[in-house]
Amino acid sequence: MKLAQTLGLTEVQTEILSTVRTFVDKEIIPNAQELEHADTYPQAIVDRMAQMGLFGLMISEEYGGLGESLLTYALCVEELARGWMSVSGVINTHFILAYLLAQHGTPEQKRHFLPRMATGEVRGAFSMSEPELGSDVAAIRTKAVRDESGDYTLDGRKMWITNGSTSTVVAVLVRTEEGHERAHDNLTTFLLEKPTGYGEVSPGLTIPGKIHKMGYKGVDTTEMLFDGYRTGADTILGGAPGNGFKQMMDGIEVGRVNVAARACGIALRAFELGARYAQQRSTFGKPIVEHQAIGFSLAEMATKVEAAHLMMVNAARLKDSGQRNDVAAGMAKYLASEFCNEVTQASFRIHGGYGYSTEYEIERLMREAPFMLIGEGTSEIQKRIISKGVLRDYRL
């Protein structure tokens, strides 16, 4: 049986997935090792993804996108991450910004950004985190102060922005003192347009340089420094201040399905590599796959790949149906990321000493899998969401 198959897909979904899978096998997997080890931005691959319409996958047809579901998007991400996880990162933050605009943007903001985002001409990113706050979003310090003209001045420091230098519009969550009692109600999302590159890219806005990481290479991760950066009130997402927290949490919910899909893709690739190596390598006169220890390990890996995929698909379908999916997304992200790391390590063990060599693909996956544990909220954050959500229906 083939793992990670999805029942009930339409002909269009099947066709899109088939196209992406072929693209991954022919253009991503053969080039991923070299690009990843050199930490090189995969420009040719990104250009090809734009041609295929992947930047506009969930943007409605009204704005020039394909108007597909979260499920279609997540299954495409699974395929891309199977090839090279960083490539899925290039479209992930772009997709979250497009989702935020579609759900919360003013008509003018949608018309201004979405058609150009659908083609990949405008590239999106989003920023919540700061150097000292981690998952404590209410503690955001970067401030936007309104002056008498109605414009805002931003000061502060944002952290961990994927596509920080290659994006041309960033959704930034900052503090606007609206006088609300709840800290969450004093947060606002600004849509800031900027040029690509490093250094002071706009007056008062600096992208200092690329953060060097253990894995997740090729894609740029940066800080963002504001020092007297001025912007108009019309750049507030949705037009009114104080709604930033709710908007960003909505975006993070679909982002968690995305990270679950990425984890599924890495796990599936780790299984494929382990199963192939186990049939090619022989010890004690037979292929190691015929040793029960290896056979049992492959059985556990396959079951984990399948379970993670099913939970990810369920979370995506729930969101597509319009139902609340915070618990399902949290469960899918938690389970898929943990299983991804377990499956990758099991495949690494099957490879033995060769798994430690940079010539073998599994070495790269061993550095990429841990990012799934922390991206879009750690496993511990997911457990908090799950326990609170489950107790809504099991409260005494």
Image: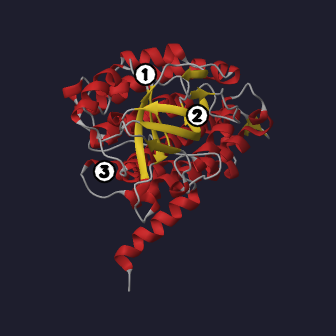
Q: Determine which quarter of the picture holds residue 162.
A: top right
SS for callout 2: strand
Where residue 22 is drawn, which disc sits there?
1
Q: Is residue 235 left or right of residue 8?
A: right
Residue at (47% x, 70% y) in the render: 387
Q: Are there few (<14), some (14-19), or many (20+) residues within 10 Å of tag 3?
A: many
Please report whichever mark, 3 or 2, sits nearer to the chain's N-terminal start: 2
SS for callout 1: helix
Q: Are there few (<14), some (14-19), or many (20+) residues within 10 Å of tag 2?
A: some
SS for callout 3: helix
Of 96 and 20, nearer the camera is 96
Q: Where residue 108 sits: x, y (%)?
A: 24, 30
Between the C-alphas of marks 3 and 2, the distance is 38 Å
Q: Are there few (<14), some (14-19), or many (20+) residues within 10 Å of tag 1?
A: few
Could one spot residue 244 in this view of the protein? yes
Please report whichever mark, 1 or 2, sits nearer to the chain's N-terminal start: 1
- Residue position for label 2: 227
Q: Where residue 64 sits: x, y (%)?
A: 24, 23
Q: What's under tag 3, amino acid-wise?
A: Lys
Q: Is residue 26 left or right of residue 373?
A: left
Could one spot residue 84 in this view of the protein? no
Evaluate if marks 3 and 1 touch, with contact meaning CB atoms under 8 Å apart.
no
- Residue position for label 3: 319
